[in-house]
Image: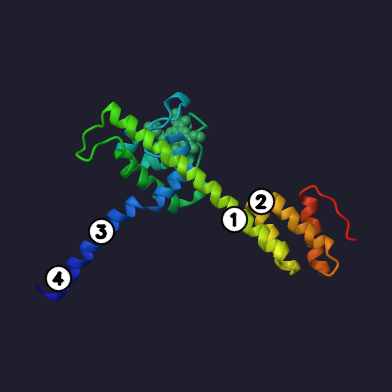
């Protein structure tokens, strides 16, 4: 075999491995878990009682990528509960759509392509609910850890601009009490510079807290 053919073969084999691996662990999977799974569930089963349709049984998902992309991007014209996800941007929209039409579309099938029995589906739904619960718990724990680390670095520091910046980041992430702690620390410390104190005061006022520089 010519060297160039050999290289070409390697490239083809490589891209095949890459493409299968990239769907299974695709960014679409994580995006789906964040934005869609609370209604449509990890395995696409949906929640019938709540009116969230199954995606793994959806004709649209199985047969029409463009329509699937469109309803994800624009939302449903019939039901505002299925909102628009245009704000995630075209790249993420394509990743989500790929994941839905390739992985979720087959979620109710056995590996040989036959439909799962009701019992198998129930077992798969149970596993998916468990996975979701674990994921929520993990996210909560990570959040707590993050909040704690912001609190600690604000507490340890005597650098006013650093504290204000950390507090602003904490506020952005929704850690309001940590942010207020940081702003107050800056306002209450005479040895800290005025610029940072003013910024902290303004931030506190935005949060509805009035303080005076002593
Ligand atoms: C708050 C619940 C909720 C969330 C979150 C949600 N959906 Fe939906 N989705 C719905 C509802 C309700 C419908 C039915 C809309 C209708 O009747 O027109 C729907 C319909 C759909 C459909 C059309 C199915 C069909 O066969 O008609 C697709 C595809 C879909 N959603 C994908 C997604 C994706 C992908 C995400 C995440 C980016 C998502 N949805 C997030 C509730 C939700």
Q: Residues within 10 Å of mark 4 (few under 14, many from 20)?
A: few
Q: CA distance from mark 3 to mark 2?
A: 42 Å
- Which is in the foreground here, disc 3 or disc 4? 3
Kindly state the secondary structure of the residue where label 1 is placed.
Answer: helix
In the displayed structure, does residue 143 sit left or right of residue 85?
right
Point out residue 18 in the picture as x, y percentages from the top left corner: 29, 59
Q: Is residue 69 above or below residue 92?
A: above
Q: Residue at 59%, 51% (x, y): give it.
A: 144
Q: Residue at 81%, 49% (x, y): give it.
A: 209
Q: Residues within 10 Å of mark 2 (few under 14, many from 20)?
A: many
Q: CA distance from mark 1 to mark 4?
A: 51 Å
Q: Is residue 56 visible?
A: no
Q: Which residue is mark 2?
A: 175
Q: Quadrant of residue 155?
A: bottom right
Q: Which residue is mark 3?
A: 17
Q: Is residue 27 above or below residue 157?
A: above
Q: Which residue is mark 4?
A: 5
- Which is in the foreground here, disc 1 or disc 2? 1
Kindly state the secondary structure of the residue where label 3 is placed.
Answer: helix
Kindly state the secondary structure of the residue where label 2 is placed.
Answer: loop
Q: Residues within 10 Å of mark 1 (few under 14, many from 20)?
A: some
Q: CA distance from mark 1 to mark 2?
A: 9 Å
Q: Quadrant of the N terminus?
A: bottom left
Q: CA distance from mark 3 to mark 4?
A: 18 Å
Q: Who comes first in sequence, dot 1 or dot 4?
A: 4
Point out residue 34 in the picture as x, y percentages from the top left corner: 48, 45
In the displayed structure, does residue 165 sit left or right of residue 85?
right
Q: Which residue is mark 1?
A: 146
């Amino acid at each position: 075999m010519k060297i160039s053919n050999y290289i070409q073969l390697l490239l083809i084999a490589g891209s095949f491995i890459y493409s299968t691996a990239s769907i299974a662990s695709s960014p679409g999977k994580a995006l789906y878990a964040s934005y869609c799974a609370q209604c449509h569930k990890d395995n696409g089963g949906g929640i019938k009682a709540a009116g969230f349709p199954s995606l793994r049984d959806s004709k649209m998902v199985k047969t029409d990528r463009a329509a699937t992309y469109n309803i994800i991007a624009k939302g449903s014209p019939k039901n505002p509960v299925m909102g628009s996800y245009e704000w995630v941007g075209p790249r993420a929209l394509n990743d989500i759509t790929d994941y839905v039409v390739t992985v979720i579309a087959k979620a109710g099938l056995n590996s040989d392509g036959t439909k799962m029995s009701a019992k198998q589906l129930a077992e798969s739904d149970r596993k998916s609910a468990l996975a979701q619960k674990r994921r929520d718990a993990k996210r909560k724990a990570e959040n707590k850890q993050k909040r704690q680390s912001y609190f600690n670095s604000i507490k340890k520091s005597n650098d006013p601009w650093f504290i204000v910046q950390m507090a602003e980041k904490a506020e952005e992430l929704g850690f309001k009490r940590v942010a207020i702690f940081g702003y107050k620390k800056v306002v209450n410390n005479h040895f800290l510079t005025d610029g940072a104190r003013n910024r902290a005061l303004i931030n506190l006022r935005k949060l509805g807290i009035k303080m005076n520089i002593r």
